[in-house]
Amino acid sequence: MSDLKEILVNKKNCKSIWFMRQAGRYLPEFRKIRLQNKDFIKLCLDSELSSEITLQPIKRFNLDSAIIFSDILMVPYALGQKVEFIKHMGPKLKEFNFNHFKNNNKKSFTQKLQPVYQAISKTRNKLCKEKSLIAFVGAPWTLLIYMLDLKLDKEKIDYQKIKLKREEIILILNKLNEYLFIHIENQINAGADVVQIFDSWAGLIRPEDFVNYCIEPNFKLVNLCKKKNIPVICFPRGIGRNYKKFNDVVRPNGLNIDYEVDPKWAKKNLKNVVIQGGLDPKILLNSEKDIMSSAKKYLDTFQDLPYVFNLGHGLLPSTDPDKVKKLIKFYRNY
Ligand code: CP3
């Protein structure tokens, strides 16, 4: 048995495999579509194409789960903040306007994201029933980083701004959570089987803010999914030893570890949760021998536990799809 949903719910000693960013730029069939669709947000709002892209890695590799082709930044987009993707620069959002943000309404939010929900329904209809369809959201803190343009460089943010605007930040995080509730509910109603919450920049939160900015918002989102009887996986990337505290308090069904987490430490400290991922996506740029021996380390460690094979962050655009195929074969033969 390899159905992700089953493993997350029953926590049986089974394995499953999918990859973060499995639908993306390393696939020539994706790049072909992308070349004809210069506006990334518009592409995410084309339910036919989004569904097709979602199924590309399933057709090519027969992975156990599909993750809907969309983006965490569809939420700021639907809240009226223009989002652009500039080549080699990443996402760029129009300047944040607090009054505009506050004046959003739930109906028009849902309306704007309707194509995402249609893509989920279409994909669920096409996907065989043994495979889970994963929907996702970005956690409020991670969305905030992009919405307020707080990034200084790749791994640094303007924390001074956060300290100065503490009250406003709490208001924004709470408001975002309200809209994420709606987005999660709508995705579940459209047919999603599992939800993953990406908190990609959780590792940048200072210790004194960790509970308010990471634990609290994730806890609320996890509880919503539980109430809806939908298993939920969290990915609070970069939080180190705080993975234990996160797991003990937030209690998600699944927890994706990043590549800085030692799998042996995770096995010992992360209890009553299905561990997912860990393998450094950069390893996939190395030799086959390297790839397999690194993958083996995770499979050996978690062999007597339920485990979802995945990465410690998303697949890199320069990954060779053939190496992905070989890795999957290695996993299947293990
Ligand atoms: O295959 C999948 O995983 C499903 C689709 C998916 C995308 N983005 C498509 C995408 C998912 C799950 C995401 C999540 C996402 N988006 C996160 C959280 C995970 C993470 O990587 O930390 C974040 C932070 C974003 C925001 C975002 N979107 C960035 C920073 C970028 C540009 C650089 C990059 O990492 O690719 C995007 C664009 C984006 N989202 C692309 C894809 C396939 C590339 C678009 C292109 O230029 O063709």
Image: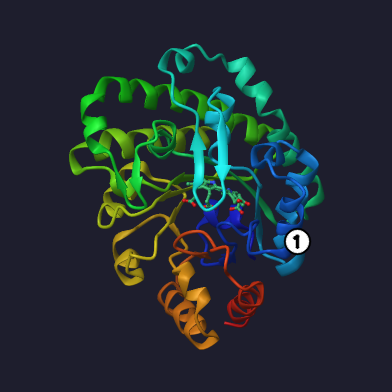
Judged from the image, the secondary structure of the residue bearing numbered disc 1 is helix
Quadrant for the C terminus in the image: bottom right
Looking at this view, name the residue that lies furthest to the bottom: 289
The residue that mark 1 highlights is 29
53 w.r.t. 39: above or below? below
Q: Camera-side residue: 214 or 219? A: 214
Question: Residue flagged by tag 1: what amino acid is it?
Answer: Glu
Residue 328 in view here: yes
Residue 320, how many percent across, how many down? 62, 73
Q: Could you tell me residue 277's position as x and y percent?
A: 47, 63
Q: How many marks?
A: 1
- Which residue sits at x=29%, y=67%? 265
Report the side of 22 relative to 176 (left or right): right
At 50% from the left and 33% from the top, the residue drawn is 93
Compared across the picture, whether 253 is left or right of 3 comes to left
Q: Residues within 10 Å of mark 1 (few under 14, many from 20)?
A: some
Percent across and percent down for residue 39 are 68, 40
Q: Residue at x 27, y 38 (%)?
A: 158
Q: Is residue 277 above or below residue 325?
A: above
The structure residue drawn at horizontal position 71% and vertical position 36%, both measured from the top left corner, is: 45
Q: Judge by depth and name the residue closer to the eye, 2 or 294.
A: 294
269, 178: nearer the viewer: 178
